[in-house]
Amino acid sequence: MGIAGLAARLRAHFGWDGPAPPGQRRALVFLSGLPGTGKSHLAAAVAARQPAVTVRTDEVRKALFHPPTYSSGESGVVYLTCYALLEALLADGYSVIFDATNLTRAGRKRLRKIAGRAGAPILRVETAAPAEVVARRLERRAAGELEPFSSDADWPVYQRLAAGVEPASGEEGIVVDTSGDIAPAVTAIISFVQASATGGRPPVQAECQTATRAAGGQRPEGGQGVPGSRSFHARLVEGIVRQDSLLCIGLDPEIGLLPAHLRALPPGEAVLTFNRQIIESTADLAVAYKPNLAFYESLGPAGLEALRSTLRLIPSGLLAIGDAKRGDIANTMRHYARALFDVYGFDAVTASPYLGKDALAPFFGRADRGIFVLCRTSNPGAAEITDLDVAGQPLFLKVAERVQAWNENDNLGLVVGATVPEELAAVRQICPQLPVLLPGVGAQGGDLEAAVRAGLDGEGAGLLVAAARQILYASSGDDFPLAARRVASDLRDRINRMR
């Protein structure tokens, strides 16, 4: 059963069928917080005074899994199901209180998009409490002394979730310390919901408005994904640390391999719908997405528009790598740089080294953008060229040496295939700090463990493991986002165990 089917089943299970009853006003209140911070208590207090449907991730989890394990894969299914529930309830005019731990920027962004599509105002409320208060609450919870709506999450679950918190600095919302009097917060939240019925600006949201979001926003159309003076390498390291991942997901959609219900759509729409669901189901698992431009160019203008729209779906903070493999004289490369970095907004691209430094200079000069230079690729015939003897060394090692010398702006990397771990180890010896884009771990048959161990730098990073087909086409049915997430989560975890 796909996500839509699970959501419909749960809606009937909880008695939320049909349009909203009188007294409900379309609005979304998102209560987030770690276990023990009082979000369910606050949600219950609001619901007692304001007609609303309360969607609790813990109730959904218990309805889907017996017993719940709170694993990342399980949580992915729970949140995807909740998102579908929220979409349906808001469409039918309900006031919805979403009681969830969801502390990732990607998750919060998705909720704003759901509310936007429904034309519903959204208020984010984050609950907090001093550590000693949380500890006491969790002890009482374990002893069965708290309200029946409290979750089963204990102190180890709290610690695991706390380690993955992505701060909401710069985002609209309020923080409520539930160790004190929560009545003012309850009143403010109810005022927000009631004001939404008039079409006016809800007061709480107005009071808490900030000028811009500091992180997690959409990639601007036709502009830089993350502008600034930081080197690309610094941005890559930050992303790896923040996401705790080395996974790069290739967005290479082939119309003939898409699920049947998508193949019935116009090609551009099919590709965009497919990419959207892949990104939404995996954004917390990856550090980068890598569209190969050929899959979009082959569809003509509709494909190129789908590519531009896809890039806008990638959350800021995650890298968009244009797999273009460009290589030409300098004058032409200036236009390629403008197209890839300024028109599309890619954070990094792949390029060919065989026209030399002067040809690549227009790319190299963008210090905040990455250039992954082809070194030793993963295809079977690569050795015909890359293994040619040059003064006693194979050509690919000469390329690695050159790229190392060219890396004046700390923004260069290498493409080395997972199908040749011995060659990768030799490259890493020559270039101990250059980041490596590593294709070939899936359908091309690369040895994941051998390649990752050969490619990691001294910090247990410096590597982007690219996977496309094994994730994108994990299922040909309606459940493809869930299947993609399962494969991506497993791959991310396998890579991390080797770091």
Image (cartoon, grey):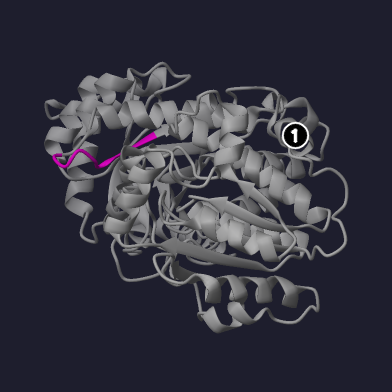
Looking at this view, is 432 or 334 the one in front?
432
Residue 464 colored magenta?
yes
Residues packed near mark 1 inside 10 Å, few (<14), some (14 to 19) or many (20 plus): few
Residue 207 colored magenta?
no
Looking at this view, is 191 or 476 the one in front?
191
Compared across the picture, whether 340 is left or right of 23 comes to left
Task: Name the image quarter holding residue 17.
Answer: top right
- Which type of secondary structure does the marked residue at label 1 adopt? helix
Residue 278 in sight here: no
What residue sits 30% from the left and 55% below the top?
238
Residue 348 in sight here: yes
Where does the image place residue 233, in percent across and percent down from the top left? 27, 54
- Amino acid type, label 1: His
Compared across the picture, whether 222 is left or right of 156 comes to right
Compared across the picture, whether 402 is left or right of 438 comes to left
The residue that label 1 is drawn on is 13
Disc tally is 1
Looking at this view, is 51 or 337 the one in front?
51
* Overall secondary structure of the magenta section: loop
Where does the image place residue 36, in percent across and percent down from the top left? 40, 51
What residue sits 55% from the left and 65% below the top?
124
With respect to residue 255, does 372 lie above or below? Answer: below
Where does the image place residue 390, in percent across and percent down from the top left? 18, 29
The region drawn magenta spans 458-465
Instruction: Look at the image and tell me in which quarter the N terminus lies.
Output: top right
What residue sits 69% from the left and 68% below the top?
121
Instruction: Look at the image and tell me in which quarter the C terminus lies.
Output: top left
Extreme-front residue of the structure: 145
Where does the image place residue 50, in percent across and percent down from the top left? 71, 65
